[in-house]
Image: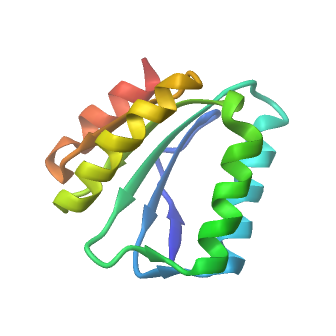
Amino acid sequence: MITELAESECNFLGFEISGKVTLEEEKEWVQKFEDCLEHHQKLNVLIVLDEGATWGVDAGIEGIKWVMKHMKSIDKTAFVSSRNVWKWLVSIDSFFAAMVGIQEKHFDHSGLAAAWKWIKH
């Protein structure tokens, strides 16, 4: 499930991911990004991942296709998770993201406030 966080505003969007993300949820999520891009040139996104956060294959492919098409519209992405696997994935992906101008950073759950501060500055 994807839930938008109350702290979201303008082009600073925050979401919590729990359980398995379906294709329908992914499409709704992508539409929120599209709506934001109608008013802003760049997105800054904070994603809180719970212990069981996963994507279905169709949802994952949909998300990858959107990111590939809109890379230049993403400024910063903060990932908040207590799982080491997400920390490792973000550290690997941040190398490739930097090549296209996207800043990515991982935060522990205790660093949620710091993650919001980072995407807003």
Q: Is residue 82 visible?
A: no
Q: Residue furthest right?
A: 38
Residue at image point 43% right, 52% down: 47
Q: Is residue 20 visible?
A: yes
Vertical arrangement, residue 5 with respect to residue 96, above or below: below
Residue 69, compared with residue 63, is above or below; it is above
Q: Indicate how the structure is coloured in the image.
A: rainbow
- In the image, residue 4 lies at what x, y percent? 53, 59
Where is residue 101 drawn, in percent x and y? 56, 21
In the rendered picture of this protein, how many numbered marks are placed on residues?
Answer: 0
Please tell me which residue lies in front, 103 or 57. Answer: 57
**Residue at 59%, 69% in the rendered image:** 60
For the point 29% across and 40% down, the residue is 91
Q: As displayed, is residue 77 above or below residue 101?
A: below
Q: Seen in the image, is 66 located left or right of residue 19? A: right
**Residue 28 percent across, percent down from the top left:** 72, 67
Please tell me which residue is depicted at 70% across the width and 30% down the height of the picture: 73
Please provide percent x and percent y for residue 80: 30, 50
Quarter the C terminus occupies: top left
Viewed as shown, does residue 20 lie left or right of 82?
right
Q: Tell which of 28 and 20 is nearer to you.
A: 20
